[in-house]
Amino acid sequence: MRPIGGDDAVTMDSQDPYVGAQSASVAVGESTPRGFGHAGFGVAKGKVYSGHFVLNGDPGTQVQVALRWGAEFG
């Protein structure tokens, strides 16, 4: 996992983790996109995948989730 928006954008929160000892916590910014990326997922052509994200945040916070690959992700 690598932070997007600076090293301080993502911290590991152990106060109220969703599962395990800690959960990723993203400090949102008003003008700079922030979050995290994760490399190394294998995805094969012609296969169907399903999954989910669990988000918890303040009302009014806008969130965008994207799956990207190749040079665009870096």
Image: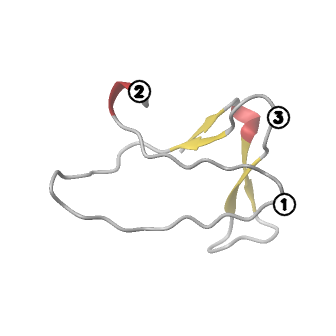
Disc number for residue 21:
none
Identify whether 18 is placed above or below 48: below
| Residue with the mark numbered 3 | 30
Tag in front: 2 or 3? 3
Dot 2: element: helix
List x then y, in percent, for residue 65: 55, 49
Q: Is 73 displayed left or right of 48 in the figure?
A: right
Residue 59 numbered mark, or none: 1
Task: Looking at this view, name the residue that lies furthest to the left.
Answer: 46
From this viewpoint, which residue is outermost toward the bottom?
19
Q: Position of residue 57 (x, y in %)?
A: 79, 60
The amino acid type of the residue labelled 2 equals Glu
> Looking at this view, is 28 or 13 the one in front?
28
Location of residue 67 in the rendering, given as x and y in whole percent from the top left corner: 43, 46
Which amino acid is tagged 3?
A: Glu
For label 2, the crowd category at 10 Å Cα-Cα, with few meaning under 14, some 14 to 19 and many 20 or more, is few
Q: Residue at x 30, y 64 (%)?
A: 49
What residue sits right under mark 2 in the picture?
Answer: 72
- Disc on the earlier residue, 1 or 3: 3
Q: Secondary structure at mark 1?
A: loop
Give the colouring mode of the picture: secondary structure
Would residue 49 be found to the left or right of residue 22 on screen?
left
Few, some or many residues within 10 Å of mark 1 (<14, 14–19, 20+):
few
Q: Earlier in the sequence, mark 1 or mark 2?
A: 1
Crowd around label 3: few <14 · some 14–19 · many ≥20 (10 Å): few
Mark 1 to mark 2: distance in Å? Answer: 31 Å
The residue lying at 70 percent from left, 29 percent from top is: 6
